[in-house]
Amino acid sequence: MSTGDQQRPIPHTEGRHVAMPLGGIGTGNLALGADGGLRQWQLHNIGNHRGELPGSFFAVRVSQWEPPFDAVRVLQAPPAPLGSTSTPLVTDDVVPRWQRDLLARADGVASTTFTGTYPFGRVEYHDDTLPVQISLEAFTPLVPLDVDRSSLPAALFTFTITNTDSVPVHGWLGAGVQNAVGGDGVLPPDGVHHPGYGGNTNRVHRSGGWTSLLLENQSLSERHPGAGQMVLTCDAAPTAALPAWTSPQQLLDFLASRQPFAAQDWAQLPPDASDPQPTGSWAQAGPSPAGSTWNAALAGQFTLAPGESSTVRLALTWHFPNRQVNFTQFGGIRPEQLADRAWLGNYYTTRYPDALAVAERVQAEWHELERLSRDWTDVLGTGALRAGAVEHLAAQAAVIRSPSFFRTADGHFFGFEGVHGASTLMWSGDVGGSCPLNCTHVFNYVQAVAHLFPEVERDMRELELDVLQAPEGFIPHRLLLPLDTPQLWDREIGGPGEPALDGMLGTVLKTYREVRAGAGQDWLARYWPRLQRLLHYVVEGWDPQDTGVLHGIQPSTHDIDLAGVNSFMGTLWLAALRAAEEMALLLGDRAAAQSWRERFETASRAYDEALFTGEYYVQVLEDGDPVQFQWGRGCLSDQLIGQWWAHQLDLGHLLPADHVRTALRAVVQHNLRTDFTDFEHGYRVFADRDETGLLVCTWPHGGRPEVPTRYCDEVWTGTEQQVAAHCLAEGLVEEGNAILEGLWSRYDGRRRNPYNQVECGDHYVRALSGWSVLGALTGHVWDATSATLHLRRPPHGTAYPVLTHTGWGTAEATTDGLVLTARYGQLAIDHLALEGQVSSAVDLHLGPGERATVAGPVP
């Protein structure tokens, strides 16, 4: 991860905070560190950034017959001294104590380097004392638009071992994992001990060239929260198994004791051989004593001539079906109050009977899953995107597959605001989901889900309009589970207390986005009456005099009530009016379209006249408005958030274009701070020392209120990316790049994890505004209602990614013209708009691998 050359190797000493998640949508995760260690185990349906699984590590034994050589190494680099890499409010640098103890007793490798374009992470192990070079590539399949392939509960590892010596070498590549069935995902095991353990069994199975260990606990009840399965599988021939061990040294001794034998000898072993087990049979270890479990390990052999390379593939799969409401919900609803209604289940576990079935799919489809996932990273890395952008855009999908999101057994898709961590310790601990659920105002920033996986984002809109919306028309900004629970229609919600107005306006915008992303006109017709009811509720509540301007108390994403005339709520309102007009036109409701258009024109003039100072847009309080938590004459970074939305939905300028650009320049000038050394942090610290970050609000000309808008002195990555993308869309390239360079340099692995942008919790979903940067860089806008693709011409000889709701590929600038190539699904495009000029119909239908020239030569 780098703001310089793409794929710059990061030494583990510079990437202490790198922790790349491995896991599918709604399945839970583990993470791979730049040092080669596995950490942040979160398989048990609860977010826990400090989740540990002792005994889970990789190791290698390397031997030579002549000259004599034999060595065992833990495949992990040495940890930094405790506390030496700490950063405020993040813990991705934490190396579990058991790993520190292991590396203090056993030899690790001298160093590692990490490179990654999500979902692929590559670790190179460096040790001059070994006659081999070893590398690891890890990934979990990620195929945009393909929710099924992107939701596998699996982590895939490919080790490549190369003989760098002049004589043959042989050895064993080992992988250990703890049987965590019965654990709660919260309390860290003490070695193999945990209160939930006991009765754990590990079985060995060989089939189709793979050796698998099935880790389970059949003594648990079917609905026990920790019930489930894990599978570790390896494709090496031969593979030896150690089904039950309790200390890491036992695994290292196991590797050291293995006898070499060639693949042809393996085939001739007698059927009753106990090590290795005969093909198709099972050998069982267990059940484990009460309060304890077994670790399990596989070791794949390799034999290499000088200069020769070999690979060993390993996969870990899991199956934990009993997700429950294990979090306190707003409205004071605690898990224990739900009793038998707390069970939610897991959608991914309805797709497979057990973890072995997942392993068998991974074994059979490994190469196809890898090819499709690599096709995606290749599409992003086509060369036209500037240095650093590819890795950070690719990392957006890591948030979608973090424990911030989950799917219940019925297939519904839900999101916390983030995962509790160091940034939430002061008020809610560091385990579980932060601020449940489907928070409409925070999700106003989220763009990546709708473009990468539109079907699950569409489900969130349906929940808002089918479940959350009250009979009066308003929509609370948080959803309660189970879905038959009375929603927050008549109770204080929290963050803010009343239904957030920006969240309701966002529902209108997001609904139109989903229509443009392929939901279809019938889907829109189904929800149009509900949207109309919502819009009329807003008018009656905040503009009863038909001024076009919203007045009074306006609950917002800053967890407080805004007031008066302000452009934060105002531009969202303007964008919602334009979206309503466009949706009405799609449905042939010209009267409604005309009504919303007239209101928009009135509102646009009124907001601009009332709020634009000639430099930026301010807030004007009216008689009776509260003064606490307002920004008044300040410069709010999010002051034009609705215009950011409008550009993504092709709605045009909501306010005079020159005023918009002037205000954006002022935001960057006043709010982008390049040094925080002497800055006074009033609350949470998301940028410090000599870092660069965009403050939520400043008062460049004085007049800061005694109690200003909450969080004004913080740096939110979701806002930074929103403003940066908006700047780029307006042609303010220098300003947009300055914000992005600051953000990306903060999250480059040295002090923060590039796969974990933090706000109120880890993997905070507001950060998914970052997907809009891709559209801003390339001009990419897709409208499924007319099958129109908007795009800028990429520089000659390069390409831009193209993503529609039915397929994805590239648009390459060649001497013959702009060439579209499909890489996945179908690229079905009726119209192409280059540089804003809509072409005649292109009527393009391309399947995977097909290409067509759709525009004239590129100068």
Image (cartoon, rainbow, N blue to C red):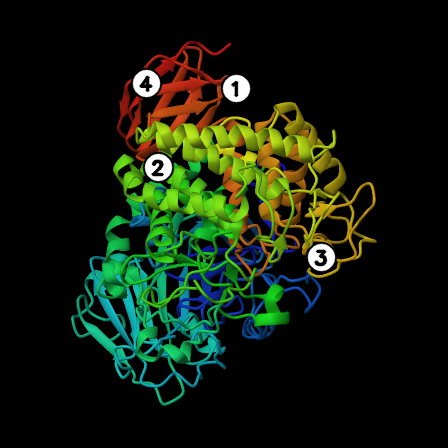
The residue tagged 2 is: 515
Pointer 3 local density, CA inside 10 Å: few below 14, some 14–19, many at least 20: some
Say what amino acid the circle numbered 3 marks: Gln
Counting residues from the start of the chain, the first of labels 1 and 3 encountered is: 3
Residue linked to disc 3: 628
Of callouts 2 and 3, the N-terminal one? 2
Residue 807 pos. (x, y %): 32, 34
Residue 223 in picture, x, y percent from top left? 28, 77
Q: Residue at x 33, y 50 (%)?
A: 462
Q: Earlier in the sequence, mark 3 or mark 4?
A: 3
Which residue type carries mark 2?
Answer: Val
Q: Are marks 1 and 3 in contact (CB under 8 Å)?
A: no
- SS class of the residue under badge 2? helix
Whichever of callouts 1 and 2 sits on the residue coming sooner in the sequence is 2
- Name the secondary structure under disc 1: loop
Tags 1 and 2 touching, CB below 8 Å: no
x 49%, y 58%: residue: 32
* Circle nearer the viewer, 1 or 2: 2
Q: Nearer the viewer, residue 827 or 212?
A: 827
Nearest to the observer: residue 133 or residue 550? 550
Residue 802, percent from left and from top:
40, 30
Q: Secondary structure at mark 3?
A: loop
- Amino acid type shown at disc 1: Pro
Tag in front: 2 or 3: 3
Position of residue 365 relative to residue 783, above or below, is below
Residue corresponding to mark 4:
852
Bin the neighbour count of mark 1 within 10 Å (Cα to Cα): few under 14, some 14-19, many 20 and up.
some
